[in-house]
Image (cartoon, helix red, strand yellow):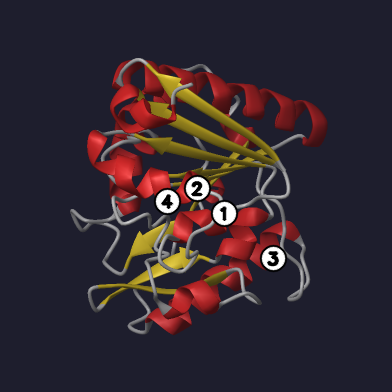
Amino acid sequence: MKKTVEVLSDKSALIARSLDLILSKLETAIEQRGIFTIALSGGSTPKPLYEAIANQKLPWDKIHVFWGDERYVSPDHLDSNELMARQAWLDRVDIPAANIHATPTLEGDPAVSAAKYEQHLQKFFHSAPTEFPSLDVVLLGMGDDAHTASLFPHTDALKVCDRLVTVGNKDGNPRITFTYPFINAARSVIFVVAGANKRPALAQIFTPVADDFAYPSRLIQPQGELWWLLDAEAGLELQS
């Protein structure tokens, strides 16, 4: 694993750097494999990043979009990660509908929805049930409790190591989430983190020894590249 930590001057610089990095990975992926696969994160931090991507002139037919996690709500619900990404980016560009691989959330049973998304991923990547296919980029945020995707501290989702997708739990509310082994199969994992409230969690993530199940972002150790992009408020204590 190649790990890179960058602390940017402010949130605008953080978004600009995130955009540059994603565009670089996109160019390489299309040059080498003909397509670019990316899993999106939710939350407020990546919204301006998605808006910036929408303003680019890109080969949209070669870009395939997935979600690393999703709240168990309908796609038109205000809490939906899909809705946010569509409004900020996907509905503003000519990306083919078939290239948008939304998380199923209308089955009435989160376990059924998780299995359905896993089957879709296996079909897309032509992977066997025992294989973890490699996305080009998995974009992640991090909560002040050190959760990422919908992998929350001390929850059952952290124990799932033989699936691509499982059911996460946030205060009794189900989520659909990639498992950490699937995230770790990615060619590049990019954390985009902003805010001083993230410093205590980051201190635990970057310390040599801590409880992975208390600080789930520690479990993200991809086979490819790991990027931590932080604004100055989040990364103050990590600057050398």
The amino acid marked with disc number 4 is Gln
> Along the polypeptide, which appears first: circle 3 or circle 2?
3
Circle 2: element type: loop
Would you place residue 203 above or below residue 171 in this image?
above
- Toward which corner of the image does residue 153 lie, by quadrant? bottom left
Would you place residue 32 above or below residue 119 in this image?
above
- Observer-side mark, 4 or 3, equals 4
Determine which residue is flagged by label 2. 207
Q: Residues within 10 Å of mark 4 (few under 14, many from 20)?
A: some
| The label number, if any, that marks residue 220 in the structure image | 1
Quadrant of image for the N terminus: top right
Q: Residues within 10 Å of mark 3 (few under 14, many from 20)?
A: few
| Marks 2/4: CA–CA distance | 5 Å
Determine which residue is flagged by label 3. 123
Callouts 2 and 4 close, C-beta under 8 Å: yes
- Observer-side mark, 1 or 3, equals 1
| Marks 4/3: CA–CA distance | 37 Å
- Observer-side mark, 2 or 1, equals 2
The answer, for residue 104, to whether it is visible in the render is no
> Along the polypeptide, which appears first: circle 1 or circle 3?
3
Q: Residues within 10 Å of mark 2 (few under 14, many from 20)?
A: few
The amino acid marked with disc number 3 is Lys
